[in-house]
Amino acid sequence: MAILTNDVVIGILLYTYALGMFLNGVILFASLIDRKKLLKTRMDQITFALILVSFIWSTGRTVIQTLQGLGTITQANQGSARFSNMCLVFIFFLNGNLAMERYFQIKEHPYAKQLYVLLYVSLAMVAGTMFWAFWTSPSITGISPIDVNQRLAWAICIFLTFCGTTLVMVWCYARTYKFSARQFKENPMMLSFFMKAGEEAQDPETLGLIRIRLERQILMKCILLSMSLVVCYLPLFVYSMLLWYNGFDQRTPWDPDHQFFFCGAILLAIDMVISPLLVLYFKPELRETVFFWKN
């Protein structure tokens, strides 16, 4: 017996996307209100763009789930497939861009400009291919086009977007952690900037404990930023690849009741809640603006 039914999943997705719309909307509003402080760096602006796309997708999916719940449209809606795939492409590329920017902020790279150009050209090519695929072929699955050539182009774009972004994020965050840890080790006095009240800058034991604390914080930050995206999108990525491999027959033996697909769709929606919460967690100045009544 199926645990997740279509009506149950529509309800879960509706409330999850609505919560994501609210959280992302609050961050957007706070960032615009205090933009001189919250949008002053390139990383701030990339984060804002990511939250903006997340807000657009959360809002769009809230409307889509509402219409599905009312029976106005179905999962196989053509507009829904186009909208979701385009938003996913931008979310992945912005996450990759954010990882690159974090690394290049602490470590100069001789080919940084060329790598950014490569990223933006790749985004344009993937987005253009997705646009062509969905505007020249109908979609009866709500996930991909149905014509053979367009299906293949879609599958290649999804594979390159997911795998490419994952590799970029893992590499950038691993390098960020490694370089930061080495800098703290080679320049102990840097640790004095991160001392808490009552800690002695000249005490070697104290400096060692501060270094361990900072390294743990950086490592945890890198793990959360990379794993949250991978965990939330991996199930639906695997489902999409299996769907393409099986000729897009949704009556597949490995997912007869669509439970795998439903779980992947729910995790996808959960990322719209996790992303703004992570932004709030890692940006104290944003928290000060959002929770202004505590100041």
Image (spheres, rainbow, N blue to C red):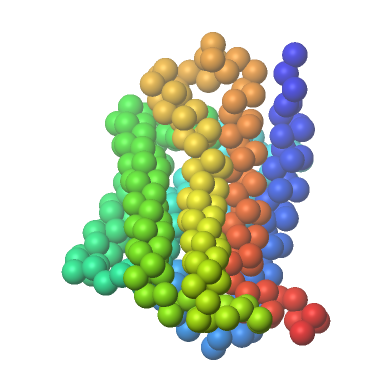
Residue 47 location, x and y as percent? 50, 68
Depth check: give the residue in front, 83 or 218: 218
Identified at 45% across, 24% down, the residue is: 243
Q: Is residue 133 visible?
A: no
Residue 145 location, x and y as percent? 42, 34
Identified at 37% across, 75% down, the residue is: 187
Outermost bottom residue: 36
Q: In which quarter of the image is the C terminus?
A: bottom right
Q: Quadrant of residue 60?
A: bottom right
Depth check: give the residue in front, 18 or 206: 206
Residue 206 location, x and y as percent? 55, 72
Q: Is residue 273 left or right of residue 188?
A: right
Q: In this view, does 134 lie to the left or right of 210?
A: left
The correct choice, above or below, for 193 with respect to 47 in the image is below
The correct choice, above or below, for 108 with respect to 221 in the image is below
Depth check: give the residue in front, 250 or 98: 98
Identified at 42% across, 18% down, the residue is: 246
Outermost right residue: 293
Identified at 72% across, 38% down, the residue is: 10
Q: Can residue 202 be seen in this view?
A: yes
Depth check: give the residue in front, 18 or 146: 18
Residue 165 location, x and y as percent? 38, 49
